[in-house]
Image: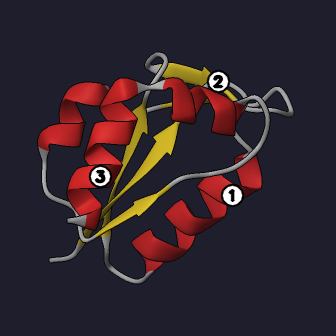
Amino acid sequence: MKHACILLAEGFEEVEALTPADYLRRAGIEVTLIGVTSSAVKGSHGITVQTDAGTEALQREYDAIVLPGGMPGAANLAESAAVRARIQQQHR
């Protein structure tokens, strides 16, 4: 089975995170919502999402990684050393 993760940091754009999660799951792809800043992450429009895992889940292998935009969510993702390392690993 294919496996994707969606990384959520405070201020993420809700539609850019939850729409892909919905579509991927409908397609039979396992999706893990990873909280980069906490286990309950508030989006840029005030919607709080309970994540499936914390940054320890970045150690798993994924077929795809989704990085939602939104501000300050995108900046918070960029500030995370764990996220940067995982994206570099995925690229290699």
Q: Mark 3 points at which residue?
A: 88
* C-alpha span from label 3 to label 1: 21 Å
Callout 2 environment at 10 Å: few (<14), some (14 to 19), or many (20+)? many
Please state the horizontal and vertical placement of residue 88, each as a whole percent of the image. 29, 52
Q: Is residue 24 above or below residue 86?
A: below
Q: In this view of the protein, which residue sits in the foreground, 60 or 80?
A: 80
Q: In this view of the protein, which residue sits in the foreground, 75 or 40?
A: 75
Q: In this view of the protein, which residue sits in the foreground, 24 or 91?
A: 91
* Quarter-of-image position of residue 35: top left
Q: Mark 1 points at which residue?
A: 16
Q: Which residue is drawn at 62% across and 55% down?
A: 18
Q: Name the residue under label 2.
A: 10
Q: Which residue is drawn at 38% across and 39% down?
A: 84
* Quarter-of-image position of residue 51: top left
Q: Residue at x 60, y 26 (%)?
A: 76
- Element assignment for label 1: helix
- Element assignment for label 3: helix
Under mark 2, the amino acid is Glu
- For the C terminus, the quadrant is bottom left
* C-alpha span from label 2 to label 3: 22 Å
